Amino acid sequence: MDETGKALQKVARGMGIVLVGTVISMFLTFLSRALIARYFDRYQYGSFTLTMTIMSIAMTVALLGLQSGLPREISLYLRERKEDVPALVSTGLTMAIIASVIMAMVTAYLSPYISPLLNDRYLSETLRLAAPALPFMVLTMLLVAISRGYGRVRENLYFRNLLPPLLFFLILITGILLGFGFTFVFIAYVISQFLSSGIATIGMIRLGLLPRRLHFSPRLAKELFLFSFPLMLTGILDYVMGWTDSLMLGYYFNPDIVGLYNGAAPIARLLPLFLNSMGFLYMPIATAFFTKGDIEGMDKLYRTTARWVFLLTFPVFMFVFVFPESAIGLFFGPKYVEAATALRILSAGFMFHVIMGLNGMSLIAIGEPRANLIGNIFAATANIVLNVLLIPLYGIEGAAVATAVSYIMANIYRTWQLYRKTGVHPFGRNYLKVLMAGLTMIIIMVTTRVNSGVMTAVAATLVAYVLYLPVILLAKTVEKEDVELLEAIEAKFGVNLRPVKKLLLRFVS
């Protein structure tokens, strides 16, 4: 097996763990959101969404881009300057912890000014209650980033995907059963983040991934900051693209409309699930290919992961795009079904993001984080302008269009920059066949669908996907790397996939 095959196997093995963790995390987060949406009124759910949005932006600033920059630097140092890794880790942690404490104080101080700006009578209190969670959120993110630099994925499963949402859900449901009010939601959030970061710190020390004493190096701090600062700005702009819609709906309308819109937005954001899971180990492996000058290997890795991520995501997209009312009703109940059109628009934008593959992580892997930044600047600017123009006229549908367009713009720019600098792109002949067959299936389903219940919608989606798979097989879209991915899954989980591999080998192009 060649180097690319081995890399694909490693990505597939890592994806299995990350995928399980991400699914659990999203499921628990969905349960918490659904609980809040159903137990409290739509205004309060909108207020919760606005609070979490502001907290996420503050966390992104406090992280200083280190959640992406630190894994890459650790990966490089382990090969070239292994003795400096403890100092590198200590320096990164110190920088982020100081920044997070400052951001927590700033957020609490600004809360009375933010509340009237977003027409939210709760926000002044909820932000002050939630702000103490920031240092713990940042610490957990950095601990997972450190383990990622070592090529490990289990810490992401335990300390990020599982513990925080599970603890939040358990504390939240306990408080609701005891009759506590809306403000307890944010107390529960702080407690869950505090416990998670404490457990994660102890676990990382026992694994030997954290130095027992923090050592701050000004030289390493400068190096980390210069590489990670564009990533921080990129992260902020990612949140601008992802959350400006909610903030501006709050500005132009009120938290009730924000709550309605967020009956659609979280469902659409499920679509990059497999993309993000595949990407967790992709970046350090792609970095290794690039540093060795193996662009061909990186290209195969990129194309194969893009094709598999699309195939895994496509049935979910079909269900959400063709039957948006059923998807919203399933998760959030009938009072959010008005957001069906917004969900369809958002899902198209996020699916385009999935189709383009791991372009952003590839740019980081080749040492070009500024290309991500520039793309996000264009997209975030377009997002703000479109929100200003469209929200007053079209409400939540206008917000959805603004977000979808911004994601499309960002991905087009990133893919173009990656191709310009390396010649790498996702659109091989076989991938184009897969995409065209998928587009045809969506058109057929949209034009022939009838209003139906959830079970009928799920059944129709499954039947369509079962028909879609033989079509792409007969079009000979299978490549040898696909079989190698199956071998990795087979080895990891101890399942016998020989009949599937034998079938695929008959359709290798």
Image (tube, rainbow, N blue to C red):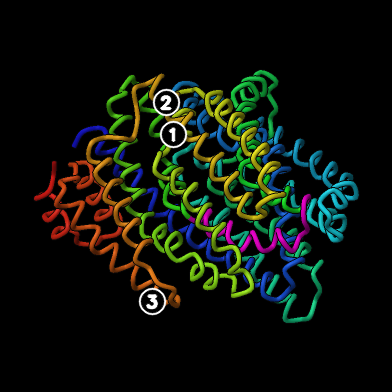
Sequence-first tag of 2 and 1: 1
Q: Which residue is mark 3?
A: 456
* Residue displayed at 74% across by 65% down: 188
Sequence-first tag of 3 and 2: 2
Quadrant position of the N terminus in the picture? top left
> In the image, is 411 to the left or to the right of 255?
left
Q: CA distance from mark 3 to mark 1?
A: 36 Å
* Residue displayed at 68% across by 41% down: 389
Q: Residues within 10 Å of mark 3 (few under 14, many from 20)?
A: some
* Residue displayed at 78% across by 58% down: 254
Label 2: state its secondary structure: helix
Whether 348 is drawn above or below 211: the answer is below
Sequence-first tag of 3 and 1: 1
Q: Which residue is mark 1?
A: 359
Q: Amino acid at mark 2?
A: Leu
Label 1: state its secondary structure: helix
Part of the protein shown in magenta = 251-270
Label 3: state its secondary structure: helix
Q: Amino acid at mark 1?
A: Asn
Q: Amino acid at mark 3?
A: Thr
Q: Residues within 10 Å of mark 1 (few under 14, many from 20)?
A: many
Q: Position of residue 47 (x, y in %)?
A: 76, 60
Q: CA distance from mark 3 to mark 2?
A: 42 Å
* Residue displayed at 43% across by 55% down: 19
What is the magenta segment's predominant secondary structure? helix
Q: Which mark is residue 418?
A: 2
The reply to whether the magenta stretch includes residue 207 is: no
Residue 414 versus residue 141: which sits nearer the camera? Answer: 414
Of badges 3 and 2, the one in the foreground is: 3
